[in-house]
Image: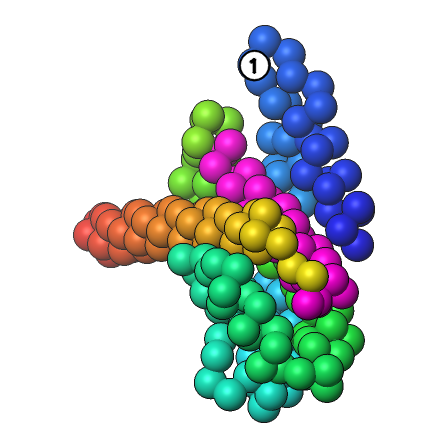
Amino acid sequence: MGWLYLCILITPCSRFQAGNCSVMRAFVKKYSGGKTVLVFLISANFLYLLMLFLTIPEVMVYAKGMKLFDMLPTGYNLGYATTFLDTLGPDGRRVYLTHQLPVDLLYPFFSAIAYCLLMAWLFKKLNLIEKPVVYLCLIPLVAGLFDYLENFGIITMILKYPDVSTLLANTVSSFTLIKSMLSALFFIILIIAFAIFLIKQILTAITFNRTP
């Protein structure tokens, strides 16, 4: 799934011509229809709820109040990483590796595409799909890429425990931090785009009602 996602991320921008990512624009225009967006949003949020109410609580049973790595948006250090993995114990690390992470390897694929296409759908409604602003649709995809890097890093730390190096912990932490920053950024963009869309809808309705 990770390699397929990387292909989707890289392929649209593989044919730059005079700085114009035409393939990416064509991709989001074609697949940002309401039904497609809805399918990916439902899939992403189903996986999110599955983690939130099932797999994450399974790991938290062993965590003794400590937070999972991807629940620390500002990152962590080697001390936290080793203490957390030690606190989980063999059973907790096994549950993390075999229950939580498999679901978390599916989630970035669906969520990144869902929010990329949702952003594109909003830009179409705002008549911005032909503008350079369309490249903002890449932000969820890049965030998804760092989500995969984070997950692969967490898998590596679990498998290498207790021999987790400072370099490994800091690298995975940086992936977590970048993913969190990019996720916050595209949600802010989505909120702004939704607000503009709703304002335009309201103004259009008011204008229509005033028309004799």
Please indicate, yes or no, whether residue 142 appears anywhere in the rendered image.
yes
Image-based side of 49 in relation to 185, left or right: right
Task: Kindly indicate the quadrant of the structure image that contains residue 25.
Answer: top right
Q: Is residue 163 above or below residue 199?
A: below
**Magenta region's main secondary structure?**
helix
Tag 1: residue type?
Gly
Instruction: Check residue 141 for magenta coloring.
Output: yes
Residue at 58 percent of width and 90 percent of height: 61
Task: Kindly indicate the quadrant of the structure image that contains residue 87.
Answer: bottom right
Residue 63, x across and y down, in percent: 55, 84
Residue 92, x across and y down, in percent: 67, 83
- Mark 1, Cα crowd under 10 Å, few <14 / some 14-19 / many 20+, is few
Residue 212, x across and y down, in percent: 22, 50
Please indicate, yes or no, whether residue 117 appears anywhere in the rendered image.
no
Residue 147 or 153: which is nearer the viewer?
A: 153
Residue 11, x across and y down, in percent: 74, 31
Residue 37 or 44: which is nearer the viewer?
A: 44
Residue at 62 percent of width and 54 percent of height: 165
Quickly name the residue at label 1: 19
State the extent of the magenta-drawn residues as a range: 134-162
